[in-house]
Every structure is written in structure tokens, then in C-alpha cells.
Amino acid sequence: MIDSAAIKSRALHWLNALYDTDGYLHWALNHWHIPLTSLESPGDQYICWPSKRFVANSSLRYESEREGLEDCELMFLLRDALEKQGAGREDAQRQMEAMARKAVRAPQDYTRSWEEFEAARRELLGAVVAAAR
């Protein structure tokens, strides 16, 4: 995966929010008994590695995915807050999507800029704070 942009892992979970899905199955997240050379990948094929402490050692892609999961939860918080203010589910989803689509427009159309992701995240966070008042 050395030729795959780390930001792709973050965009994945924005898609969860944009398409209102319940989650994501990461196949073989801890399937560590496969040697690193077995799949002839151009980099690492693991998103995290085993540790002697019985927890996974992280990677840049894993941290990017964690950020994406937090962003996804933020989007769902915004949608829920808008619904509590009286917006219908579809309208709340549409308002949340309008902000999120500044960074992720479609599965293959998303910004490659961390700054643009962070700007969209700040806008979403500001909207959650405003909706909670």
C-alpha cells in the first residue's frame, strides 16, 4: 500500500456518513500470520502490526482511518443535532452533506489536501456547536 495515499483511509469514513451506512469491515485487520512478502504488495499490506503488549501497533494509514471515523461520528452528531432542532432526517442529512462534500464529493472524487479536510472538519464542528445551542 506504499503507493496508496494515506488520506484515502480518512475519506473512506466520510463516505460512511455521506451514504448513511452503519460501518465498514476491514478484512484481515489482524491477519498477521501472512508474511509481508506473500502478497507481493509494493509496500506493507498491514494497517497495524502485532505488539508484545497484546495491542496493535499503529501506522499512518491506521491513524488516518481513526481520524476518518471521528469525522464520521462528528457528521452523525451534526445530523442528529439538526434533527433535534426540528429538521427532518433528509433535510438534516442534506445540510450535513453540503459541508462534508467540500472534501469528499464521491468515492473516487475527494481532496488530497489535509488542509481542506481539516477546513471541512472545522466547519462541521462549528455547525455542531451552533446546533447544540
Image (cartoon, rainbow, N blue to C red):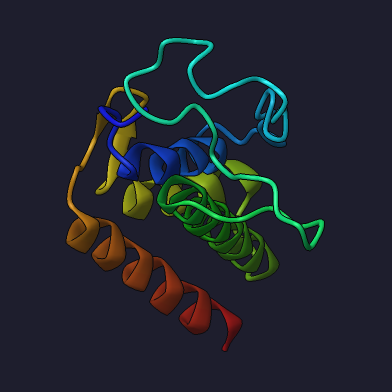
Foreground of the two, 70 or 103: 70
From the viewer's perspective, is 124 left or right of 82? left
Q: Residue furthest top?
A: 39
Foreground of the two, 79 or 22: 22
Across and down, in percent, residue 117 comes to: 28, 57
Figure quadrant of the N terminus? top left
The structure residue drawn at horizontal position 32% and vertical position 20%, both measured from the top left corner, is 42
Foreground of the two, 31 or 10: 31
The structure residue drawn at horizontal position 57% and vertical position 89%, both measured from the top left corner, is 133
The structure residue drawn at horizontal position 19% and vertical position 63%, both measured from the top left corner, is 115
Across and down, in percent, residue 61 comes to: 44, 45
Is 94 drawn above or below residue 36 in the view shown? below
Is 90 drawn above or below residue 76 in the view shown? above
User: Total number of numbered labels?
Assistant: 0
Q: Quadrant of residue 111?
A: top left
Across and down, in percent, residue 43 comes to: 35, 28
From the viewer's perspective, is 108 left or right of 45? left
Across and down, in percent, residue 55 comes to: 76, 57
Q: Residue furthest right?
A: 54
